[in-house]
Amino acid sequence: MAVPFLDHQLIEMVRKIPPKLFIKLSKNKTILIDKYILREAGKPFLTDEVYQAKKHPLLSPPSTVQTNKAFLNYSQDVIRSNVANVPFLDEKAVNKFLDNIHSLGMDAAIKSDLVLMRILSICLLSKIFML
């Protein structure tokens, strides 16, 4: 998982920025422009292609298809030990999902990895910040 802005001073400054500067409606009011303030700050230094680029997620190689299952096993352990404390996750559904990961085919395993990482992130954030 990429965490490019893990600088508390930056986060404190960004929290003071009005939310309307993060996402803006295009001039013709048909497209939402994400990262608006970041794009505007970098505009003098960016090519048009980069400035107008759509957001794409940065994904790590899927843990569900790695031959070394250490991270997958760690992820499952963390999720199983924390999912009950996350009120908006269905504990039974999450555990069923985890039980089935090892038996998925390659394509399904790759697709399930994004779900796994999101559930893991939610569980870790919930635990760390006592949400």
Image (cartoon, helix red, strand yellow):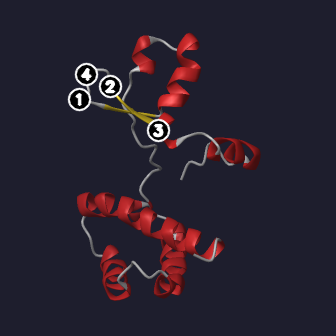
Asked if labels 1 and 2 touch by Cβ distance under 8 angstroms, the answer is yes
Is the residue under label 4 in contact with that under label 1 (CB below 8 Å)? yes
Which residue is identified by label 1? 30
Q: Mark 4 points at which residue?
A: 28
Q: Which mark is residue 26?
A: 2
Amino acid at the residue labelled 1: Thr
Q: Element type at marker 4? A: loop
Q: How far apart are marks 2 and 4 (CA)?
A: 5 Å
Q: What residue type is labelled 3?
A: Lys
Quadrant location, the C terminus? bottom right
Image quadrant where residue 116 sits: bottom left
Give the number of the disc on residue 99. none
The quadrant where residue 29 appears = top left
Residue ranking furthest to the right: 9
Q: Which amino acid does label 4 sit on?
A: Asn
**What whole-number distance in Å separates the C-alpha atoms at marks 3 and 4?**
17 Å
The residue under label 3 is 20
Pointer 2 local density, CA inside 10 Å: few below 14, some 14–19, many at least 20:
few
Distance (Cα) linking label 1 and label 3 = 16 Å
The image position of residue 22, as x and y in percent, is 49, 37
